[in-house]
Image (cartoon, helix red, strand yellow):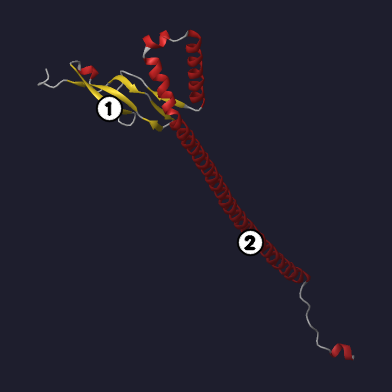
Amino acid sequence: MSKDDKKPQIDSPPEEEIIQEEDVSFVEEDDSETDSFGSSASEKVKKLKQELSESKKERAEYLAGWQKSRAEYANLKKEEESKRSGLKQLYVSECIEDLLPTLDSFEMAFKNKESWEKVDATWRKGIEYIHQQFMTFLENRNVQSISETGVPFEPRLHEAFEHIPVDDAGKDNTIESIIQTGYKIGDRIIRPAKVKVYVLKTVEEK
C-alpha cells in the first residue's frame, strides 16, 4: 500500500450544493445593497420636501412683508397728501378772510339796485367786471359762497341774525334771506352766513 492510499479522504460536497450556497450568498448581498439605496433615496426626498416647505414659508413671509410695506407706504402718501391739502386750504382761507370786507362792499353796492342803476354805465360795467374776476379767482381755488335761501338752517353754516315768525310749518327753521354771505373752502368754513330764519309761530303768537 502506497503512502497516498493511507491519507484519509475528505468527501467533497456535491457541486449542486456549492452552487446553491453561492447563489444564496449573492442574493442576500444584493438585497442588502437595495435596502441601503432605498433608505438613502427616501431620506433625500424627505429632506427635499422639508427644504421646499421652508422655502414656501419664507416666500410667504417675504410676500406678506412686502405687501405690508407697500400698504404702509400708500397710507403714508395719502396722509402726506391730506396734510398738504389741509395746509393749502388753511392758507387760502386765511387769504380769503382778509378779502371778505372787499367782497362785502361789492355786495352792498349791488344790493341797492336803484342807486346802482343810476351810476354811469361805463363805470358800473367796469366794477361788475372786476367783481366777476374776483369771483372767478375764488372758484378756481374751490371757494364757495354760502348764500342759498329756502334751505334748512345749519348752525355750522349759518348764523341766525333774525327770526321771522311764519304760519307754514313747511318753512319752519329754513333760511328766509341772507344778510351777509358766508364762504367755505371744502369742508372748512371761512365765515358762516348771517341769515334771517323762519320759525313756526307759537299758539300764543297765533
Counting labels gives 2
| Residue 182 place in picture, x, y as percent | 38, 26
Specify the quadrant that holds the N terminus.
bottom right
| Residue 159 place in picture, x, y as percent | 30, 29
Q: Which residue is drawn at the image coordinates 39% and 32% (left, top)?
A: 189
Question: How many residues crowd around disc 1 within 10 Å: few (fewer than 14), some, or many (20 or more)?
Answer: some
- For residue 57, above or below residue 205: below
* Position of residue 31 in the picture relative to residue 136 (left or right): right
Secondary structure state at the residue bearing disc 1: strand
Residue furthest to the left:
204
Q: CA distance from mark 2 to mark 1?
A: 86 Å
- For residue 139, above or below residue 97: above
Q: Nearer the viewer, residue 118 or 48?
A: 118
Q: Which residue is drawn at the image coordinates 24% and 18% (left, top)?
A: 171
Task: Indicate which disc, 2 or 1, sits on the residue closer to the N terminus.
Answer: 2
Q: Nearer the viewer, residue 172 or 15?
A: 172
Residue where numbered disc 1 is placed: 160
Mark 2 or mark 1, which is nearer to you? 1
Q: Quadrant of residue 195?
A: top left
Residue flagged by tag 2: what amino acid is it? Answer: Glu
Asked if one can make out residue 1 in the rendered structure from this viewpoint, the answer is no
Residue where numbered disc 2 is placed: 43
| Residue 32 place in picture, x, y as percent | 68, 67
Residue flagged by tag 1: what amino acid is it? Answer: Ala
- For residue 87, above or below residue 152: below
Q: Nearer the viewer, residue 162 or 101?
A: 101
Asked if one can make out residue 108 in the rendered structure from this viewpoint, the answer is yes
Secondary structure state at the residue bearing disc 2: helix
